[in-house]
């Protein structure tokens, strides 16, 4: 019983933190414009995935771009971590999680997080980034999130004038791609 109370209070704390994160994002209109070095960020994402997975998954991190991003390092870290946490949470033991940074021909870049987990039925895909939206199944109930993660991710990417795309099918895993436009400094030549 004590254990259950501890879990519930952790969930409550997480919920409050996520709500605060969202309202901070909404209140703050100026976006930081700093260099976001990707090599250390990818290394951090790898560490986070391994820590959450506790060795239950195979984790691969690939840098096919070798570019850094621009914007808020803290926010981008938060967005990418959310995707990584979902991949671990919604992939059963023995699955594979791949994080890949790619560069686009137009100078933009994208970070994709794909997994070999439960996947998501098509009917839910369009609504995933709504606040508190969770795909209803006994599986997601068990894993106890609040449904704010992807709302935060979408908000952060929008602020960076990027976006989020999702490809998935039940039993086929899921691939979330966060894309970001070319940095303004790249555009002026
Ligand atoms: P939290 O607020 O803790 O992130 P959450 O993970 O439930 O809670 P979101 O991250 O917003 O909330 O995700 C919304 C829903 O989308 C999840 O409940 C889950 O049903 C589905 N989902 C997200 N990522 C994946 C994934 N990689 N594979 C399968 N389903 C996913
Ligand atoms: Mg989540």
Image (tube, helix red, strand yellow):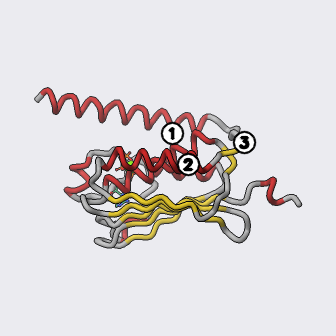
Residue neighbourhood size for the residue with mark 2, other residues' Cα within 10 Å, grouped as few (<14), some (14–19), many (≥20): many
Viewer-proximal residue among 26 and 1: 1
- In the image, residue 4 lies at what x, y percent? 16, 33
Residue 22, label in figure: 1
Residue assigned mark 3: 33
Q: Position of residue 35 (x, y in %)?
A: 70, 44
Question: The N terminus appears in which quarter of the rendering?
Answer: top left
Label 1: which secondary element: helix
Ligand 1 lies under 8 Å from the Cβ of mark 2: no
Query: Which mark, residue 155?
Result: 2
| Nearer to me, 47 or 163 | 47
User: Does residue 7 lie above or below 160 as drawn?
Assistant: above
1 or 2: tag closer to the N-terminus: 1
- Left-right relation of 164 to 119: right
CB-based contact (under 8 Å), mark 1 and mark 2: yes
Q: Which of the marked residues, 3 or 1, is nearer the chain's N terminus?
A: 1
Q: Are the residues at dot 2 and dot 3 in contact (C-beta closer than 8 Å)?
A: no
State the separation of the CA atoms marked 1 and 2.
8 Å
Is the CB–ligand 1 distance for label 3 below 8 Å? Answer: no
């Amino acid at each position: 019983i004590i254990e259950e109370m501890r879990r519930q209070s952790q969930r409550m704390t997480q919920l409050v933190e996520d709500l605060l994160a969202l309202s901070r994002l909404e209140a703050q209109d100026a976006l930081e414009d700093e260099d976001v070095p990707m090599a250390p960020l990818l290394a951090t994402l790898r560490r986070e995935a391994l820590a959450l997975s506790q060795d239950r998954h195979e984790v691969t991190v690939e840098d096919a771009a070798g570019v850094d991003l621009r914007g808020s390092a803290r926010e981008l870290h938060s967005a990418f971590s959310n995707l990584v946490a979902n991949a671990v949470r919604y992939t059963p033991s023995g699955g594979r999680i791949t994080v890949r940074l790619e560069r686009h021909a137009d100078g933009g870049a994208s970070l994709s997080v794909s997994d070999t987990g439960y996947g998501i039925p098509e009917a839910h895909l369009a609504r995933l980034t709504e606040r508190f939206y969770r795909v209803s199944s006994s599986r997601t109930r068990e894993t106890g999130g609040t449904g704010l993660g992807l709302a935060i991710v979408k908000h952060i990417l929008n602020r960076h004038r990027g976006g989020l795309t999702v490809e998935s099918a039940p039993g086929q895993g899921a691939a979330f791609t966060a894309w970001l436009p070319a940095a303004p400094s790249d555009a002026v030549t």
